[in-house]
Amino acid sequence: QLIPFDAYGATLNDVGRANLRKILEIFADEENYPVYFHCAVGADRTGTIGMYLDAILGMSSEDIILNYNFTSLAGELIRSWYHTSDCIGLWEYLEEIMPDKTVAERLMANLKKSGITDETLDTIRDILLEK
């Protein structure tokens, strides 16, 4: 299933949140597995979905950032949580509206604002985490 999706701060507007919700609902249906998600290079849109999945799965903020930084291996551009302009925009915006929260908490808060239910989040965890 092809779902149009823009990365980073685009997940903070109504259209982006609706598409983020659609994408994560795919991950919440075990019949969809294996799930293959990708974009042109495998970093920006893929990295953004990866960040949200990492947060859902309970990764620490440090590991979420490190995992995102590995997306630099996907192409010729050097990407970094702290140096990619679009990513900085998402990071700074989330920091501005939630200064007392971790990166993981900020990402989870945006998932909630996107209308992603606890049931969907729990289902994704149940599918992706070993018991």
Image: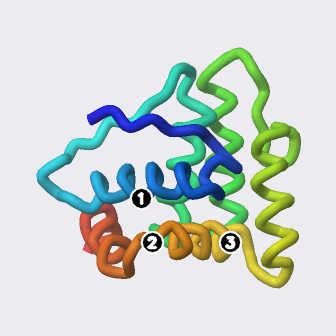
| Of pointers 2 and 1, the one earlier in the residue sequence | 1
96 left or right, relative to 50: right
**Residue hosting label 2:** 115
Is label 1 in a helix, a strand or a loop? helix
Quarter location, residue 107: bottom right
Three-letter amino acid code of the residue under disc 3: Arg
Is label 2 in a helix, a strand or a loop? loop
Three-letter amino acid code of the residue under disc 2: Gly
Q: CA distance from mark 2 to mark 3?
A: 15 Å
Check if mark 2's residue and mark 1's residue have beta carbons within 8 Å.
Answer: yes
| Of pointers 1 and 3, the one earlier in the residue sequence | 1
Q: Residue furthest top?
A: 76
For image coordinates 55% across by 73% down, the residue present is 113
**Residue hosting label 3:** 106
Q: Quadrant of the N terminus?
A: top left
Which residue is at the front of the view, 62 or 20? Answer: 20
